[in-house]
Image: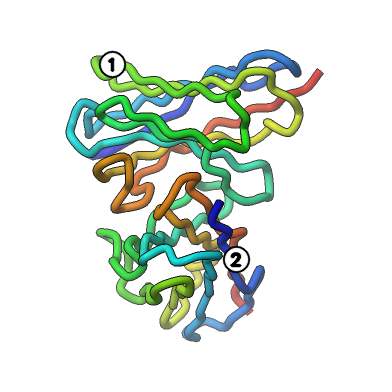
Amino acid sequence: QVTLKESGPGILQPSQTLSLTCTFSGFSLSTYGMGVGWIRQPSGKGLEWLANIWWDDDKYYNPSLKNRLTISKDTSNNQAFLKITNVDTADTATYYCARIAGTMGITTTGFDYWGQGVMVTVSS
Amino acid sequence: DIRMTQSPASLSASLGETVNIECLASEDIYSDLAWYQQKPGKSPQLLIYNANSLQNGVPSRFSGSGSGTQYSLKINSLQSEDVATYFCQQYNNYPLTFGSGTKLEIK
């Protein structure tokens, strides 16, 4: 059974760094073809893809966030991480992690399992 | 970036009806398209991948079709539990992009 769960600070101030953790089970990020992605959703709005990390440590980022993102993984503890530097109110959203499968950095399935999401508020 | 234009933005239909949601990509995405259902207060769930492949456990009243730049999600025999927002997503190229969503309500 595949499960994912996000955790984060809840609230932080503008200019701080947001650190998110995705703890998962039922698959391994050391297995060929496995990956984890991060997606966010402001309240009442649409979905925005942020970053993917693959089993071979290949990483992809949304260029719209202009080098503010860093994705990483801890394979032995079944975790993936996302850092967003210099946050502002526009980063207020629910953040999801989701499993992705494929090869050569490209998925063949879309995001097939999602976490429950973690709400993050940026406010002074 | 590949733009995904989804229509309609909202939709109201009666129980038992058939509904269609459209997604237009700004360039050919070679069927690298997924559809997700998001119920209120919940995370998205994958319904369809590769434009027309039904994800395990998804009811067969959901189906996907299309190719090139034009794709659609069809829901046959609408049920009350289908009330949700539906999103398309392309994964042909980075950055991965989503449609803006279609909110489905029961009339």
| Residue pictured at 69% horizontal, 27% vertical | A121
Q: Are callouts 1 and 2 both on one chain?
A: no
The residue closer to the viewer here, B1 or B44, is: B1
Badge 2 marks a residue whose secondary structure is strand
Q: Mark 2 points at which residue?
A: B5
Residue B39 position in % (x across, y down): 52, 56
Q: Name the residue under label 1.
A: A77
Question: How many residues crowd around disc 1 within 10 Å: few (fewer than 14), some, or many (20 or more)?
Answer: few
| Above-or-below relation of A49 to B92 | above
Question: How many residues crowd around disc 2 within 10 Å: few (fewer than 14), some, or many (20 or more)?
Answer: some
Q: Which amino acid does label 1 sit on?
A: Asn
Alpha carbons under labels 1 and 2: distance apart: 39 Å
| Above-or-below relation of A22 to A34 | above
Badge 1 marks a residue whose secondary structure is helix
| Above-or-below relation of A53 to B55 | above
Q: Residue B9 carries which label?
A: none
| Residue pictured at 58% horizontal, 53% vertical | B40
Residue A40 position in % (x across, y down): 57, 39
Q: In which quarter of the image is residue B33?
A: bottom left
The residue sitting at the bottom extreme is B17
Disc 1 vs disc 2: which is toward the camera? Answer: 2
